[in-house]
Image (spheres, rainbow, N blue to C red):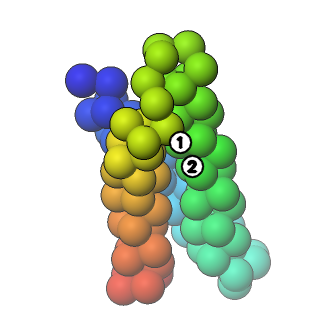
Amino acid sequence: MRTALFLIAGLLLLGAALLLGRLFSSHYPGATFVATIAYVALWLIIAGANMWVGVAKAGYSVTEELPIFLLIFGVPAAAAILLKWRLL
């Protein structure tokens, strides 16, 4: 359930970042690129913090937590790159 919530939160944050990039693109043509890069960097930090909580606080090993980290980070980051590449 926690993984699904993180995926939904990541996709909502992606929508907000791309919306901001689109809004600022009339004054700054590279805004969508910057928004995509900033989102991926921010999401990497958030997913890494989630992995750290799973390892340090919940007691999972890194090998148990790594596939969840890759899923939580990879799906929204891939969606961001795909959306930037295809639509924006």
- The picture places residue 73, in percent across and down from the top left corner, at 45, 52
| Residue type at tag 2 | Trp
- Which residue occupies the foreground of this view, 34 or 68? 68
Give the labeled residue for mark 1: 47
> In the picture, residue 7 is in which quadrant?
top left
Q: In this rendering, would 45 be left or right of 15?
A: right
> In the picture, residue 63 is in which quadrant?
top left
Where 20 sits versus 47, above or below? below
Query: Closer to us: mark 1 or mark 2?
Result: 1
Q: In this rendering, would 87 be left or right of 19?
A: left
Residue shown at the point (53%, 42%) measured from the top left: 47
Q: In this rendering, does residue 54 appear at all?
A: yes
Label 2: few (<14), some or many (≥20) within 10 Å? Answer: many
Circles 1 and 2: CB atoms closer than 8 Å: yes
Give the labeled residue for mark 2: 43
Q: In this rendering, would 48 be left or right of 61?
A: right
- The picture places residue 65, in percent across and down from the top left corner, at 42, 37
- Which residue occupies the foreground of this view, 50 or 57? 57
